[in-house]
Amino acid sequence: MTATILAWSVTAAQLMLVAAMACNTYRLIIGPRAQDRVLCLDALYVNAMLLVLTFGIRTGNALYFEAALVISLLGFISTVALAKFLMRGEVIE
C-alpha cells in the first residue's frame, strides 16, 4: 500500500467520522426520549475515539492511542452511569 492511498483513506475516514458525529449531535439535541440521548452519547464517544485513532495513524504518535483508550474507558463508565440513573433514579447506592 502506498503512502498516498493511506493518506487518502485516512482523510476519507476522518471526514466520514465527522459526518457521523454531526448526525449523532443532531439526534442528541432532537432526541425525543432520554434513552435516545444516552444512545447518541454512546455512539458519539465511539466516533470520537475512532477519530482520535485516525489522527494517531496519520501522525504516528503513540499519545493519540493512549488518549483513545482513556476516551473509551470514560465513555463506557459514563454510559453505565447514565443507564443506571435512568433505571433507578440514582447512580450511587
Image: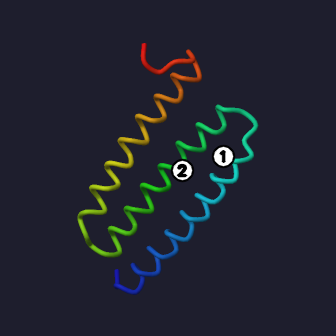
Q: Which residue is mark 2?
A: 44
Q: Quadrant of residue 62?
A: bottom left
Residue under the image location 52 percent in, 30 percent down: 82
Residue 74 image point, x, y percent: 38, 41
Q: Position of residue 92 (x, y in %)?
A: 42, 18
Provide the residue designation for mark 1: 28
Q: CA distance from mark 1 to mark 2?
A: 9 Å
Give the percent coordinates (x, y) of residue 48. 47, 56
- Look at the image and name its color scheme: rainbow
Q: Quadrant of residue 59?
A: bottom left
Residue nearest the viewer, comparing 3 with 67:
67
Left or right: where does residue 18 sit relative to residue 75? right
Is there a contact, CB below 8 Å, between mark 1 and mark 2? yes
Q: Disc 1 or 2, which lies upstream in sequence?
A: 1
Q: Position of residue 26 (x, y in %)?
A: 69, 53
Position of the C terminus by quadrant: top left
| Amino acid type, label 2 | Leu
Within 10 angstroms of label 1, few (less than 14), some, or many (20 or more) residues? Answer: some
Q: Is residue 6 above or below residue 40?
A: below
Q: Secondary structure at mark 1?
A: helix
